[in-house]
Image (cartoon, rainbow, N blue to C red):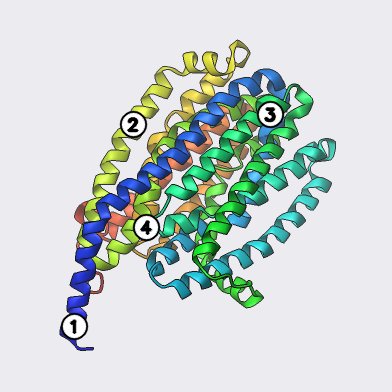
Amino acid sequence: MGPGQTSSIGICTLRRLKALSQNELIRNIAGLSGIQMTTLLVPLATIPYLTRVLGPSSWGLLAFAQAFGGYLMVIIEYGFSLSATREVARFRDDREKVREILSEVLGAKVFLAAVCLLAAMIALRWVPIFREHPALLWAALCWALCQGFTMLWYFQGTERISPFAKLDITTKILAAVGIFTFVHSSGDDWKVLALQAAAAFVSATVAMGIAYSETPFSLPRPSSAWKALRMGWTMFFFRSSVSLYTVGNAFILGLFAPTTIVGYYAAAEKLSRAAYALLNPINQAVYPRVVRLIHQAPLDAARLVKRTLVLIGIAGGCISMVLFVCAPWIVTIVFGKGYFPVVPVLEVLAFLPLLVGLNGVLGIQWMLPLGMDYSFNVIILTAGLLNMGLAILLAPGFAGPGMAWAVVSSELYVVIAMYFWLSRKRRDPFHFAPTTEEGRT
């Protein structure tokens, strides 16, 4: 094949990409918005019920177990939502390559599930709360395993979110119905995680069936699992570092404070998390598009990231302002008068939607497609260590608000560090000039 033919193929590919991009992106944002709206609305429907039925202490126990399950989920998910999505997005037209990726990732997850089981057995022995409430531990383990086997990465990489979105929304709604049906007292806290685990299991099983109806099945082998673990290592490093200041804050606080205090903090964290989840569909839909554009049309990729950054900044700022100003009213309406100690925690965590949105665009949408994995991971790891240090320093004396300030400080550090590093390397999206290799089509 001559240079002229290669150039023509590149131009045709670029034209096809531009012609299809807008409609595909809109459909994917719509599908992911459905998932996130369900993720937002279902907790808003169940949390007021659970906080009143369980009470602050059992609600805190549930939050503690969920946080531990979140750590296990980080292990089994292993960053495949980024690394495997990136690989599927690159090779989605190569059916054989997609088959290999499916086999590699699922094989790796089976191995990681065994690691999670071992971690749960260790926690049962050494964590006093789990020794007193073993049902919560095993329910949290089941929830983490079922959530960890999600197939979102496959559908996101192929940019066909709609089938998965419908499935995920349906199972989450059924889990919420189950909570209202079967959870009636403080002793039913473990049932919440068990019901959510059952919903995630159904979603993962059906989604896996859809994936293998489109791609030939290949039995995972140890060598292919090892290949996936090597492929996803940098993203796992990122996810595990992020978990130090996002996933397990209620677990960390529970090591220093009574479960009632954990319950107050968890209530505020869930509200702020539900708020910034509104921004996730944009980030998740844009990521595979930027991965493709950075190799085909890097300037278009930079323009897309700039627009996303402005949009996320405006939307996140508005959400944060509403949370901060309306915190007393929101807490009273959602949790009831007995949860007024949640207000000062929520006023601090109100900054998270803006900060999380910005660092998601700068890091996931831009640094990773540019191949700046090492710098990205260093920033995230130092942020996690900063959060742990501040938590140990602030949580014993200031309880929930202290933990909240540790989290917000870590997120602010991430935003500043990412933009400083990108500017220093002259790679920030507002002043981006592609290199010779990135400019090739």
- Report the Cα–Cα distance between label 2 and label 1: 48 Å
Q: Is residue 177 above or below residue 391?
A: above
- Report the Cα–Cα distance between label 4 and label 2: 25 Å
- Mark toward the viewer: 4 or 2: 4
Q: Which residue is mark 2?
A: 317
- Mark toward the viewer: 2 or 1: 1
Mark 1 residue crowding within 10 angstroms, few (<14) / some (14–19) / many (20+): few
Left or right? Give the position of 162 relative to 7: right
Could you tell me residue 292's position as x and y percent? 32, 63
Q: Which residue is mark 4?
A: 288
Could you tell me residue 350's position as x and y percent? 44, 28
- Name the disc covering residue 5, or none: 1
| Amino acid bearing label 2 | Gly
Labelled pair 4, 1 in contact (Cβ < 8 Å)? no
| Amino acid bearing label 3 | Gly
Q: Nearer the viewer, residue 281 or 411?
A: 281
Residue 33 shows in this picture: yes
Left or right? Give the position of 303 relative to 267: left
Mark 4 residue crowding within 10 angstroms, few (<14) / some (14–19) / many (20+): many
- Name the disc covering residue 60, or none: 3
**Which residue: 18% across, 71% down?**
11
Under tag 1, what secondary structure?
A: helix
